Image (cartoon, grey):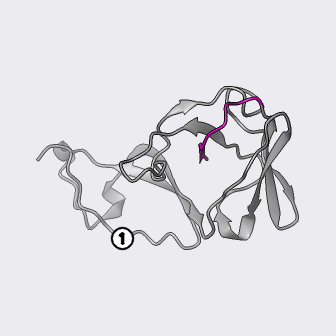
């Protein structure tokens, strides 16, 4: 089949950013020899969240998303979040394995984006600014 890849187990403890390398079918690469995968295909980051990041914001008030850095790797100073209006699956929960949806006006410093993460000791804060958004449940995308 076209576009089919063999799945492999990737250790993601404690979370990692890795370079993706590709080898086209015409190159006839040996899948057991990583040195033959020479085409740069970008990077992939596996985020390890040991504790779900959850926050309640009040209308007409400042909103900050706190994160325990030891439980959210590799989050770091300067990262940003985006708030999206995710679609609910049949069970009524917001989709968590993808960040599909529309940006939420009235929440975030600019265009649904948080301020850059500020690190204070073992925790980090994402500033979502002054809340003007409609009430609802939203997803946070990193």
Side (left or right) of 10 relative to 74: left
Front-lying residue, 36 or 94: 94
Q: Residues within 10 Å of mark 1 (few under 14, many from 20)?
A: few
**Which of 101/49 is in front?**
101
Q: Position of residue 60 (x, y in %)?
A: 84, 33
Question: Residue sitting at 71 percent across and 53 percent down?
Answer: 55
Q: Nearer the viewer, residue 136 or 32?
A: 136
Locate residue 134: give its quadrant.
Answer: top right
Q: Residue furthest left?
A: 1
- Asked which secondary structure carries label 1, the reply is loop
The relative height of residue 65 versus residue 105 in the rendered view (above or below) is below
Seen in the image, is 42 located left or right of residue 63? left
| Residue 112 on the magenta segment | no
Q: Nearer the viewer, residue 59 or 75?
A: 59
Residue 86 appears at what percent x and percent y? 50, 40
The residue under the point 73% across, 55% down is: 76
**138 part of magenta stretch:** yes
Q: What secondary structure predominates along the stretch shown in magenta?
A: loop
Classify residue 115 as left or right of residue 8. Answer: right
Question: Where's residue 71, x and y in %?
Answer: 67, 69
User: On the image, which quarter does residue 24 sit in?
Assistant: top left
Please count the marks in the image: 1
Answer above or below: position of 121 versus 127.
below
Indicate the position of residue 2 as horizontal and vertical percent values: 15, 43
Q: Is residue 131 left or right of residue 23?
A: right
Label 1, on which residue?
A: 9
Residue at image coords 11%, 47%: 1
19 over 104 or under it: above or below: below
- Residue at image position (84%, 56%) is 119
Residue bounds of the magenta highlight: 132-141
């Amino acid at each position: 089949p076209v576009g089919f890849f063999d799945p492999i187990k990737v250790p993601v403890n404690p979370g990692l950013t890795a370079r993706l390398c590709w080898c086209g079918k015409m190159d006839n690469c040996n899948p057991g020899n990583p040195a033959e995968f020479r085409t740069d295909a970008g990077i992939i980051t596996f985020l390890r969240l040991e504790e779900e990041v959850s926050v309640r914001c009040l209308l007409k008030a400042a909103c900050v998303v706190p994160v325990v850095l030891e439980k959210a790797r590799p989050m770091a100073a300067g990262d940003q979040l985006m708030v999206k209006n995710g679609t609910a699956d049949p069970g009524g929960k917001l989709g968590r394995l993808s960040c599909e949806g529309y940006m939420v006006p009235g929440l975030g410093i600019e265009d649904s984006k948080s301020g850059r993460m500020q690190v204070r000791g073992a925790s980090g804060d994402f500033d979502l600014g002054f809340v003007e958004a409609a009430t609802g449940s939203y997803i946070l995308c990193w």
